[in-house]
Image: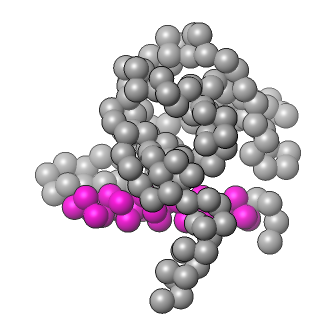
């Protein structure tokens, strides 16, 4: 399996962890359609009275860097397109850091509306997402993200390394 396929698999497993957490909270979790995914929506969650669209992000590197990566521009090797932090149409962002066992929930639309103010004093960063696919963005420190006006809450979810996440869900899928 190649690098891209490995990253995709790990991302799917991280989504399953978040799905399980939300279901355990009594919410209905519905996978987004391909059309919704193109708009930055991964799930629709429903509490029985209202539905909310959600974008998931899983970031193992945030454990080491101490930062949430707000993608400003994607695939900047070419003409560069606006990143998810500026284009997502989801209501909520759930940013999961598996090695910490924490996820940070933001009001995505408020994040977008206040993006210039939020990123004004942040350091810039660049990441290689896959071979030939890079992104530029801003580094929001985990220890101060709760002071951003779009921050809603921090939740505790299972702690996983990448290897543990793969093992856990391969085992789960077989049984």
Q: State which region is magenta.
A: 5-31
Is 9 located above or below residue 114 in the figure? below
Locate residue 135 relative to residue 77 in the image: left or right: left
Q: Is residue 62 above or below residue 24?
A: above
For this orientation, the residue located farthest to the left is 49
Find out whether residue 29 is within the magenta segment.
yes
Q: Is residue 128 visible?
A: yes
For residue 24, side relative to residue 19 (left or right): left
Depicted 2 relative to depicted 109: above or below: below
Scheme by which the image is coloured: one colour
- Residue 37: tell me if it is visible: no
Number of numbered tags placed on the structure image: 0
Q: Which image quarter: residue 26?
A: bottom left
Instruction: Give residue 97's position: percent from left, percent from top.
Output: 54, 47
Q: Position of residue 5 (x, y in %)?
A: 73, 65
Depth check, front residue: 121 or 91: 121
Q: Residue 99 appears at what percent x and percent y? A: 57, 52
The quarter holding residue 107 reads top left
Query: Residue 117 in magenta?
Result: no
Q: Main secondary structure of the magenta part?
A: helix
Which residue is at a point 62% across and 59% down the rendered structure image? 161
Quadrant housing the N terminus: bottom right
Front in this rendered view, residue 136 or 40: 136
Q: What x and y, as percent, mark residue 167?
A: 61, 75
Residue for point 52% across, 31% down = 142
Task: Tell me which residue sits at (43%, 39%) in the image.
Answer: 104
At x 31%, y 54%, the residue is: 45
């Amino acid at each position: 399996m190649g690098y891209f396929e490995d990253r995709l698999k790990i991302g799917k497993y991280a989504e399953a962890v978040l799905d399980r957490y939300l279901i355990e909270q009594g919410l209905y979790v519905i996978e987004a359609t391909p059309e919704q995914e193109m708009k930055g929506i991964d799930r629709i969650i429903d509490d029985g009275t209202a539905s909310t669209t959600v974008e998931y992000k899983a970031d193992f590197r945030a454990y080491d860097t101490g930062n949430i990566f707000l993608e400003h521009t994607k695939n900047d090797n070419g003409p560069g397109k606006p990143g998810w932090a500026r284009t997502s149409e989801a209501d909520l962002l759930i940013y999961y850091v598996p090695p910490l066992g924490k996820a940070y929930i933001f009001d995505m639309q408020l994040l977008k509306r206040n993006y210039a103010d939020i990123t004004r004093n942040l350091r810039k960063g660049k990441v290689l997402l896959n071979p030939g696919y890079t992104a530029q963005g801003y580094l929001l420190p985990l220890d101060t993200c709760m002071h951003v006006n779009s921050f809603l809450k921090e939740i505790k979810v299972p702690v996983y390394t990448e290897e543990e996440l793969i093992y856990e869900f391969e085992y789960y899928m077989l049984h």
